[in-house]
Image (cartoon, coloured by chain):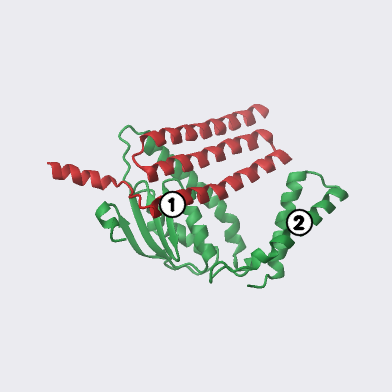
Amino acid sequence: MTEFINIISILLIALGIIFMFVGSVGIIRLPDFYSRTHAVSKSDTLGIIFVMLGLVVYEGATQSSLKLILIILFIALSNPVGTHALARAALKKGLNPFFSDDQLKKKEEHK
Amino acid sequence: MKKLPVFTLALSFISLMGFWIIMSGYLDFIHITMGIVTVSGVMFVNHKLKQHLFHEDDLADLSRFRFGSVILYPFWLLGQIIVAGFHVVGLIIKPSMPIHTTLITFRADLPSSHARVILGTSITLTPGTLTVDLEDDRFTVHALDDKSHEGITSDNMPRKVLSLFEAEERQVIHDLKIINLTQKQAEV
């Protein structure tokens, strides 16, 4: 039974780390500020949720796992606020988003 | 200024007390008494702030919530987040990176400012969509590709948020605009 619980928690934590890694790759690959914000905030939120869930499964029904669930809750509440503040500040400062269709149009004009 | 009903006060006392018990972990007389004193102090200090109306249509009391939907909503949202998260990971990892960035603007017909904040936060929490601006009832949302904003344009998520407050189902979003060229950005 303990082995089974260990396997589940390892799988969840590994999944969380994969999400965080892909988020970091996204920061490098994506084209502009807004889409990079997607990568850094969302993948990280999901990554932290999975890592914490893995730890909750490992810990079992104790006080520590209740605290971990509270951490998940507070991250889920505070992360969108920070992300929204960043993106809104960029828009108010007049930073235009990059649109994929713009590039397609430019390519057609060059032809 | 608004009057706080007993139900709201009782609910915030119970949730703060639950937080205290989880944090302390002791259930004996002396720790519970210290908790009650602390929670009462916190509620006393925050009372004026909670009475303040930040918007005209602030939610007056928590009993307007439909509690059956409120309990189910986080689990539904977690499911949406996981599904959308895998989609975004697939987008980023593919060598061709088939993203199609768009801005969508729409008006949401929701009963209170709290409902609109819940919708905005849910949109931001879901990977692939990001609430860029929220003024009165007008949302500006940045989406990574077409499948990401499907849940909003098909009125699925706004309806779920409405179901937290009202039993009847109706069209929540209107004046939907999808912007995917910089030239059109100037008009907004």
* Quadrant in which the C terminus of chain A is drawn: top left
Q: Secondary structure at mark 1?
A: helix
Mark 2 surroundings: few (<14), some (14-19) or many (≥20) residues within 10 A: many
The answer to whether one can see residue A103 in this image is: yes
Q: Is residue A49 left or right of residue B20?
A: left
Protein chain holding label 1: A
Mark 1 surroundings: few (<14), some (14-19) or many (≥20) residues within 10 A: some
Q: What residue lies at 60% left-to-right and 32% top-to-bottom?
A: A9
**Residue closest to the far left:** A111
Q: Secondary structure at mark 2?
A: helix
Letter of the chain shown green in the rendering: B
The answer to whether one can see residue B87 in this image is: no
Q: Which residue is mark 2?
A: B39
Nearer to us in this view, A21 or B37? B37
Label count reads: 2
Amino acid type assigned to the residue bearing label 1 in the image: Ala
Q: Percent from the top left, x then y, of residue B16?
A: 72, 55
Letter of the chain shown red in the rendering: A
Q: What residue lies at 43% left-to-right and 52% top-to-bottom?
A: A89
Q: Quadrant of residue B173?
A: bottom left
Amino acid type assigned to the residue bearing label 2 in the image: Val
Q: Is residue A101 left or right of residue B3?
A: left
Q: Percent from the top left, x then y, of residue B79?
A: 51, 47
Q: Quadrant of residue B105?
A: bottom left
Task: Check residue B140 in the rendering and tell me which mark sits there, or answer none.
Answer: none
Q: Percent from the top left, x then y, of residue A97?
A: 33, 48
Q: Judge whether A25 appears above or below B118 on screen.
A: above
Q: What residue lies at 59% left-to-right and 32% top-to-bottom?
A: A8
**Residue closest to the far front:** A93
Task: Check residue A89 in the rendering and tell me which mark sits there, or answer none.
Answer: 1
Protein chain holding label 2: B
